[in-house]
């Protein structure tokens, strides 16, 4: 088999060893895992998530106990269905992580698979971390490879996420490089997810992450059993890029593998909204705080954005649901102006309050050459705020809160998890504290146990 | 909700009534069903099919008995996994039906879902037929809508098949038009399947049909439970056509709904090879029979084909597997020249025999303006045969065997099923005969029972 980008990337994923991952990348990966747990817990009770969970039970998940934990209800099932349900749950609150350059949300497709399979195989924390990093490194590079044209129509986390999930699953299954390439082939040919749902306030986002996780896991399990996949699924003449991109750059697939750790470039989400709103939200916050402006003093806000923000956020003019509101720049800026934060509670309790709706109508987006040129490598936030009495303020942030240079501390991540668990009711404060205690130690666990408790502690003690 | 093509099509599928389907279309649908049963049985023992079946058992299919029958091993499971496994099985032998104009194989994604859900819901034969016709009519129109550009990279049976399967499932679940539209949305956003696998002799074709059936069924079950889908998934600005076609024609989506019965335009496959080889195969057969040519007398064959044939068949130069051989024009023409037929047994026993390989090297494909212009509405077969002693014969068929104007009789369909069942060992001759007896009567069954016997007969007697 001749060398080519898909094979190089598959070989890297198959052979990635825990000891070759720098300590700071391991630590960041643990942070990303704990951050993901909060997002997975936050999905409890959400209608689309619970609907997918009911479907899974109908399809076979409820038939007997499996080894893998479903975080929203603490049942256990097969890795396939656990990955599906946890994948559905962890993208709902829009609080899960994002990699800027690839516009890809890795955690929600990688960790459901890593956790489900690690529990099933009694893998160590080191294997768990290596598998997660394999998924991040693979997914981020494929997202960058497919480029901006892909993201205009396709939900990268659904499409690319399938292959990232396969990389994580394949690493935990101990696939050879050739088998990993098979897994990529079976995953890539199932890659799907269209943005069209946003216009209709539909539930597809949960379906995309659920099935990216489940299909990626399936692809790796099939490969372990000899099922052959396309060997050039990424860059081939009838592969993913050929079908779903017009500006693909194969060099990105193998960009500094093993020396550039893309995992550590991943941003945490501070606000519970589409990441495209965060730079402007932080820029507005700096103006409001610096000049002590009350929302009612503001006459107009122009958010200076990149084209991708207009593509994704543009279709949502008057949000009718919390989920749509997370994709509406005016609503997010309104919440930030009023509360200093756009979190799950702020959305749930007030996205359609009259003062937020009034603020929303003061906000417009404008394409900005500097912001657009820097994107997606950097997500610069710029706003122009005009007050009722005619003052004009320019606000700017170069790295929105949560980006690698402005990352969240472990305390902030823990606070976020507590807030999300309380919001959904998935865990009491004491349970969340206990779960956090275990989760921060994940890399040292000889066998991955239960997220919620007893067996995990037993494994650590063993 | 304003009227638009996706809604019109969804409404048609949701409201399609058995009594509105002309008798001859019902009869043809029964023939297509029986023809599909043969293809599903033929998948028994095939490595990719059995691998998917093992995956399904691992994922949850084996946990207890379900209502739906798996035809390759006569186990029962949930509708989801039965659809997945029967979908994987029925496309393997390349003997399942095809609709020319849409280049779509309806049976392998429609009937796995129709059978699984009808068994689970104890639906009548009339409901079963109406649901199958809904899937055919929807899938064929979406395939035509997405056009030739889609098929150049995407395996239409995988992509469009997901929505066709959703239509069939939605009809059996009694979805309202709005719910059916939701099902289309959830199915369309999962639509996937890339041709890249063919180059590597990979197993993805079985994965495509398995998951089109399973995902389509999932989409409809989700919709029945209130899960929202994109309302313009087909023709919207970030929908299927936007992402996966450059020549989509929305008028095709609603072309003569209720008066044009696209189901009855579907062709049966006579040869066990990619349909793109059939026109030339029949044209060669006419030359060989008319002029009584022995294969060794032939020096050269030029198959005059449409561009789609070159796109799909071109990458396979030297077939290494039976499956690849079915996508190699030279091998198919070699089998036809030697045996008068390219069936499953002919492929299995001799695709790489020296005389077939020698014949293969005499065959070339050439793009033909007339053939290409008529395609995909008509699949004209033209060959030019040159003998060793310099004679040149032109062969032509206007409708290859199995096309609507040259369709298979019920006797021919039964013979094909017996041959496929014997090939795979999925049923003895007596079992196949009994199964056929039940299957021809499917439209009159008050409750769909077991394909293999007792309960089906009991239902008829009830």
Image: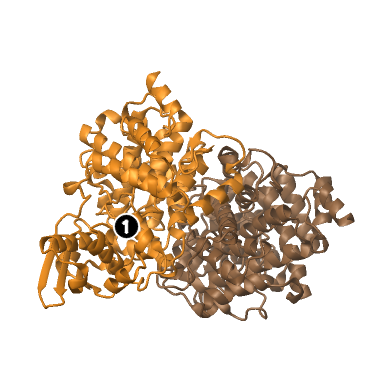
Chain colours: A orange, B brown
**Residue B81 image point, x, y percent:** 62, 47
Relative horizontal placement of residue A282, taking residue B380 as reference (left or right) = left
Relative horizontal placement of residue B161, taking residue A333 as reference (left or right) = right
Q: Is residue A24 in sight in this rendering?
A: yes
Residue denoted by label 1 = A146
Residue at (45, 55) in percent of width and height:
A206
**Residue B394 image point, x, y percent:** 60, 71
- Who is closer to the viewer here, A396 or A98? A396
Residue at (32, 57) in percent of width and height:
A146
The image quadrant of residue A333 is bottom left
- Rendered view: A433 above or below B343: above
Q: Quadrant of the N terminus of chain A?
A: top left
**Residue A86 image point, x, y percent:** 45, 45
Relative horizontal placement of residue B180, taking residue A72 as reference (left or right) = right
- Who is closer to the viewer here, A380 or B47? A380
Q: Is residue A173 in sight in this rendering?
A: no
Chain letter of disc 1 in the image: A
The image quadrant of residue B106 is bottom right
Q: How many marks?
A: 1
Q: Residues within 10 Å of mark 1 (few under 14, many from 20)?
A: many
- Rendered view: B16 above or below A21: below
The image quadrant of residue A454 is top left
**Residue A446 image point, x, y percent:** 37, 23
Relative horizontal placement of residue A396, taking residue B73 as reference (left or right) = left
| Extreme residue toward the top, this view | A462
Helix, strand or loop for disc 1: helix
- Who is closer to the viewer here, B2 or B421? B2
Q: Quadrant of the C terminus of chain A?
A: top left
């Amino acid at each position: 088999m001749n060398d080519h980008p898909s094979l190089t990337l598959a070989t890297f994923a198959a052979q990635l060893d825990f000891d070759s991952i720098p300590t700071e990348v391991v630590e960041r990966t643990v942070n990303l895992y704990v951050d993901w747990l909060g997002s997975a817990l936050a999905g409890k009770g959400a209608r689309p998530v619970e609907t997918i969970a009911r479907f899974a039970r109908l399809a076979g998940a409820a038939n007997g106990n499996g080894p893998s934990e479903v975080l929203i209800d603490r049942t256990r099932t097969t890795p396939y269905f656990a990955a599906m349900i946890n994948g559905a749950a962890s993208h709902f609150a829009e609080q899960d992580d994002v990699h800027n350059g690839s516009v890809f949300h890795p955690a929600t497709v990688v960790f459901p698979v890593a956790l489900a399979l690690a529990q099933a195989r009694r893998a160590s924390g080191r294997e768990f971390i290596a598998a997660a990093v394999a998924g991040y490194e693979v997914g981020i590079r494929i997202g960058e490879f497919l480029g901006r044209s892909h993201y205009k129509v396709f939900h990268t986390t659904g499409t690319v996420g399938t292959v990232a999930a396969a990389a994580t699953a394949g690493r935990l299954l101990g696939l050879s490089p050739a088998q990993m390439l098979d897994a990529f082939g079976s995953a890539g040919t199932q890659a799907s997810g269209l943005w069209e749902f946003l216009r209709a306030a539909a539930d597809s986002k949960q379906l995309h992450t659920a099935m990216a996780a489940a299909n990626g896991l399936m692809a790796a399990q099939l490969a372990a059993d000899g099922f052959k996949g396309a060997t050039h699924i990424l860059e081939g003449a009838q592969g993913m890029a050929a079908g779903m991109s017009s500006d693909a750059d194969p060099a990105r697939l193998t960009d500094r593998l093993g020396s550039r750790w893309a995992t550590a470039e991943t941003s945490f989400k501070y606000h519970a909204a589409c990441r495209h709103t965060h730079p402007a939200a932080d820029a507005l916050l700096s103006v409001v705080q610096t000049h002590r402006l009350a929302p009612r003093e503001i006459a107009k806000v122009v958010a200076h954005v990149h084209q991708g923000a207009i593509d994704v956020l543009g279709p949502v003019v008057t949000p009718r649901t919390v989920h749509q509101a997370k994709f509406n720049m005016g609503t997010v800026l309104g919440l930030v102006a009023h509360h200093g934060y756009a979190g799950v509670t702020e959305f749930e309790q007030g996205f359609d309050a009259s003062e937020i709706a009034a603020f929303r109508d003061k906000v417009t987006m404008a394409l900005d050459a500097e912001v657009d040129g820097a994107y997606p490598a950097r997500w610069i936030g710029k706003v122009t705020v005009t007050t009722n009495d005619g003052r004009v303020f320019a606000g700017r942030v170069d790295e929105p809160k949560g980006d690698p240079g402005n990352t969240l501390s472990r305390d902030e991540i823990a606070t976020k998890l507590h807030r999300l668990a309380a919001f959904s009711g998935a865990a009491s404060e004491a349970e969340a504290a206990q779960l956090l205690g275990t989760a921060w130690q994940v890399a040292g666990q000889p066998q991955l146990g239960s997220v919620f408790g007893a067996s995990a502690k037993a494994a650590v003690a063993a």
